[in-house]
Image (tube, grey):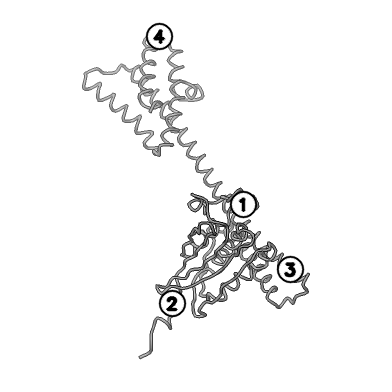
């Protein structure tokens, strides 16, 4: 490490030489005055110790390692003086302590400053992502509510009908998002995870209703293959899971090619896993996209219409309810996003026949 202990030893040697020759100004230029201060920070030793502290942070060392490195050097010098029967003069000992003190102070100061800066940047990035997630979800619910209201007004539909139901659910989602945001501000905690047991079939129908208006607005062919056993249930935060499905479907609308179809389907496996699938006709995924597409602020094919948070939010929501979200490429055709969650086993089903 070019800014580390070897350079300190070379600077210490030149400092001692300058003092032995009566060149106190040169000594202070190399290693700084006693007690630190701006002159010490701008000395050769101060500048190199600053670089050393920054380098140790980048390499993953702790602040204790910064101090111990110089402390071990002091111990080694003292041991060698005893071993070779070459004691220090009082002035030499004061110079050694001054150099060590200045070097440690500058290295630790820079280490701490860079660590605090990195921490502040990380917190800022996390806050930015949380705000982006909230805005993305608010925009989705508001967009759906606007489409529903437009359909009610232009089609003179009854507010008690299916389109009115979409509007009501969108307003409930908006209310829930605002409530969660206020809870997070008040409590400084993550979003709550309110689990409930609900049947899969009507959940899938609700997801289809919430996205059908968007499909019509985009001129996209959309089908919900709702042939689900009505007895299949899930225990999860329904709003989080619904948000994940809606984000996946809207993502499919965005990238499916003209003349292709987006489908929403679900099925249960014998081992108790429920799979919710969204298939599009995007033509397949470019190499390497599947590995990064769930990261925040990643937008495919140069798309600039959103924040690049839809897939990231979907995965976060799914993982928050204990599930997994994966993507399967269909080369030349499209891709399939699959949400996998565990099926809820009702007590009556697990107890078996009464004896």
Cα distance between the residues tagged 4 and 1: 66 Å
Residue identifier under label 1: 307
Image quarter hosting the N terminus: top left
Dot 1 falls on a residue whose secondary structure is loop
In front of the other: label 4 or label 1? Answer: 1
Q: Residue at the location (59% across, 56% down)?
A: 133
257 versus 229 height, above or below: above
Residue identifier under label 2: 345
In front of the other: label 3 or label 4? Answer: 3
Checking the image for residue 149, the label placed there is 3
Toward the viewer: 194 or 347?
347
Q: Taking 335 as reference, is 177 left or right?
A: right
Dot 4 falls on a residue whose secondary structure is loop
- Rendering coords of residue 113 (x, y %): 49, 36
Q: Taking 236 as reference, is 72 left or right?
A: left
Checking the image for residue 22, the label placed there is 4
Dot 2 falls on a residue whose secondary structure is loop
- Rendering coords of residue 140 (x, y %): 64, 61
């Amino acid at each position: 490490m070019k800014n580390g202990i070897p350079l300190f030893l070379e600077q210490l040697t030149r400092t001692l030489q300058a003092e032995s020759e009566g060149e106190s100004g040169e000594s202070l230029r190399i290693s700084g005055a006693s007690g630190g201060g701006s002159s010490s920070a701008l000395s050769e030793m101060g500048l190199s110790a600053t670089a050393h502290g920054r380098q140790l942070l980048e390499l993953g060392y702790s602040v204790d390692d910064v101090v111990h490195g110089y402390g071990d050097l002091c111990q080694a010098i003292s041991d060698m003086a005893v071993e070779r029967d070459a004691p220090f003069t009082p002035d030499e000992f004061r110079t050694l302590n001054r150099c060590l003190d200045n070097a440690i102070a500058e290295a630790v100061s820079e280490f701490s400053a860079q660590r605090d800066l990195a921490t502040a940047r990380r917190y800022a990035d996390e806050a930015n992502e949380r705000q982006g997630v909230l805005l993305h979800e608010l925009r989705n619910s508001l967009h759906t509510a606007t489409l529903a209201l437009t359909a009610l007004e232009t089609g003179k539909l009854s507010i008690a009908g299916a389109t009115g139901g979409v509007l009501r659910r969108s307003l409930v989602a908006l209310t829930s998002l605002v409530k969660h945001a206020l809870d997070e501000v008040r409590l400084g905690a993550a979003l709550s995870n309110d689990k409930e047991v609900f049947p899969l079939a009507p959940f899938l129908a609700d997801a289809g209703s919430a996205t059908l208006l968007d499909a019509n607005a985009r001129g996209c062919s959309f089908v919900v293959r709702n042939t689900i056993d009505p007895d299949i249930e899930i225990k999860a935060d329904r709003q989080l899971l619904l948000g994940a499905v809606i984000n996946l479907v809207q993502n499919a609308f965005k990238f499916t090619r003209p003349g292709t179809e987006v489908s929403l389907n679900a099925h249960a496996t014998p081992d108790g896993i429920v799979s919710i699938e969204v298939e599009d006709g995007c033509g397949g995924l470019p190499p390497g996209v599947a590995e990064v597409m769930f990261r925040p602020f990643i937008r495919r094919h140069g798309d600039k219409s959103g924040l690049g948070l839809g897939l990231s939010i979907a995965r976060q929501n799914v993982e928050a309810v204990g599930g997994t979200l994966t993507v399967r490429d269909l080369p030349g055709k499209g891709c399939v996003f699959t949400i996998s969650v565990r099926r809820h086993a009702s007590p009556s089903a697990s107890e078996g026949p009464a004896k």
